[in-house]
Image: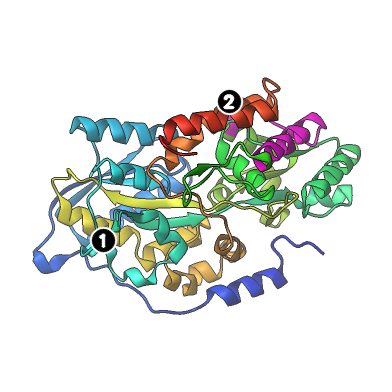
């Protein structure tokens, strides 16, 4: 029987996670003198839920270092990458610390916009970090960021609607189609909301068909291979047969409101969406939210690896305080707080033994999912691979192009971007 978050699955997941390794107390780098000055931090977390917690954590750093003023700025996630690049290139307006999506880190590092962190207080107890999380922080043998949270994706479902339709969380795409049909018949609701304006939500389908964006080892573009075409066909079929509804813009808001209001029974999302989801009228009873692994494609179950790192701007005029701030925000205690209040997955092994993480059913579910998630290519151009994919993904879902043309167009764009790749 397929399970989402159940007592049995939770016990098994937590057994994997609860490897106590002690705590890493925040040091602040005071050995070189008392810290002072301003640290400007660009936080890219969700407004209304995550931002409140991270801002409060930052205030805790100020209490430990009274002469440091943390200037908190919430920058919309969709704008932050280019905004940081423009400011760093101009040498004016860049923050001391940025919360970087994992794919941005090698990109920023390749442009010399980030300070190397090896040997600094920012990397205190670095052996405690999950190896999957560390992978995205490296560029040409140096470390340019510290992993703050790690994530993956699952299928969120409305337990009441699935029960009313007499179905369980779908194990694969065929199950998803069958379940959606019964949900429509029994409840009048659409089975799935498929976000159509963000290609990260396409990756589970691409990996599920055995495909990938590129093969960094052989410098080969792979998105336009048969597996990529099958993935585009898979998402198109979900929309064409009524299994899913989608959008061409405002995808996050449309998806979240549809799911929170009970207009759709399921959505594919990650731990970052839990806090927002639980504000919906359908989930005033938190037990009504179920989460299961993403439905498998014809080849595999392909959840992508994601997350965020904290990086220090190379041109910062307050490096000592910035290093200490990054260490504090990625410490065991800070990560435990984020796990307890936001159900976000820590990047430190020790944090999983903290009561906040142990008591989070969501963290317990996603920990083994992250351990088997598909790593994205950690290349400088990794973040730039998403825009060509976004354009074609949206066009496929809205009937403006075919899967074959979308795959070819994406592949052609990648070869122009990745000069010299096959």
Which is nearer the eye, 237 or 353? Answer: 237
Which is nearer the eye, 268 or 275? Answer: 268
Residue 251: x and y, percent?
59, 31
In magenta, the rendered stretch is 227-251
Main SS category, magenta section:
helix
Residue 329: x and y, percent?
33, 58
Residue 129: x and y, percent?
40, 67
Residue 260 in view of the camera: no
Which quarter of the rendered picture does the N terminus lie within?
bottom right
What is the total number of numbered labels drawn onto the structure image?
2
Q: Earlier in the sequence, mark 1 or mark 2?
A: 1
Q: Is residue 21 magenta?
A: no
Residue furthest top in the image? 400
Which is nearer the eye, 389 or 289? Answer: 389
Instruction: Please tell me whether mark 2 sits on a helix, a strand or a loop.
Output: loop
The residue wearing badge 2 is 249
**Residue 1: numbered disc:** none
Q: Residue at x 75, y 62 (%)?
A: 3
Give neighbour class at mark 2: few <14, some 14-19, many 20+ (Cα, 10 Å). few
Whole-number angstrom distance, CA of label 1 to CA of label 2 = 38 Å
Is 44 on the left or on the right of 364, as rendered? left
Q: Quadrant of residue 361?
A: bottom right
Asked if the residues shown at circle 1 and circle 2 are in contact, with their CB atoms under 8 angstroms apart, the answer is: no
Residue furthest right in the image? 185
Is 69 on the left or on the right of 277, as rendered? left
Instruction: Please tell me whether mark 1 sits on a helix, a strand or a loop.
Output: helix
Residue furthest left in the image? 33
Q: Residue at x 20, y 29 (%)?
A: 90
Q: Is residue 240 magenta?
A: yes
The residue wearing badge 1 is 122
Figure check: 372 above or below 91: below
Residue 256 in view of the camera: yes
């Amino acid at each position: 029987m397929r399970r989402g978050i159940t007592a049995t699955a939770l016990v098994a997941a937590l057994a994997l996670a609860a490897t106590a390794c002690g705590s890493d107390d925040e040091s602040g780098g005071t050995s070189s003198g008392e810290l002072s000055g301003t640290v400007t931090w660009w936080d890219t977390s969700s407004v209304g839920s995550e931002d409140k917690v991270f801002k409060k954590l930052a205030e805790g750093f100020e209490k430990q270092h009274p002469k440091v003023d943390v200037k908190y700025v919430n920058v919309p996630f969709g704008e932050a990458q280019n905004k940081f690049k423009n400011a760093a290139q101009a040498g004016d307006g860049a923050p001391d610390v940025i919360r970087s999506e994992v794919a941005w880190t090698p990109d920023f590092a390749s442009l010399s916009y980030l300070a190397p962190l090896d040997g600094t207080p920012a990397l205190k107890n670095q052996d405690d970090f999950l190896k999957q999380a560390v992978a995205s922080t490296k560029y040409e043998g140096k470390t340019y960021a510290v992993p703050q949270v790690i994530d993956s994706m699952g299928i969120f479902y409305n337990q009441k609607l699935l029960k009313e339709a007499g179905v369980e969380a779908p194990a694969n795409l065929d199950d998803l189609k069958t379940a959606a049909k019964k949900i429509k018949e029994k409840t009048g609701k659409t089975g799935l909301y498929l976000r159509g304006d963000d290609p990260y939500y396409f990756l589970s389908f691409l990996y599920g068909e055995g495909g990938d964006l590129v093969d960094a080892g052989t410098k080969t573009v792979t998105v336009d291979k048969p597996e990529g075409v099958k993935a585009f066909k898979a998402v198109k079929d979900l929309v064409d047969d009524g299994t899913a509804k989608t959008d061409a813009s405002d995808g996050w808001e449309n998806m979240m409101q549809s799911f929170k209001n009970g207009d759709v029974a399921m959505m594919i999302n990650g731990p970052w969406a839990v806090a927002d989801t639980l504000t919906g009228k359908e989930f005033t009873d938190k037990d009504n939210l179920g989460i299961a692994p993403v439905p498998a494609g014809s080849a595999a179950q392909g959840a992508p690896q994601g997350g965020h790192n904290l990086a220090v701007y190379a041109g910062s005029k307050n490096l000592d305080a910035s290093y200490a701030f990054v260490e504090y925000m990625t410490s065991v205690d800070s990560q435990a707080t984020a796990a307890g209040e936001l159900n976000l997955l820590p990047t430190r092994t020790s944090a999983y033994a903290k009561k906040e993480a142990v008591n989070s059913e969501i963290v317990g579910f996603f920990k083994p999912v992250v351990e088997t998630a598909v790593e994205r290519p950690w290349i400088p151009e990794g973040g730039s691979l998403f825009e060509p994919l976004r354009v074609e993904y949206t066009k496929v879902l809205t009937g403006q192009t075919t899967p074959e043309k979308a795959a070819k167009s994406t592949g052609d764009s990648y070869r122009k971007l990745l000069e010299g790749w096959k």
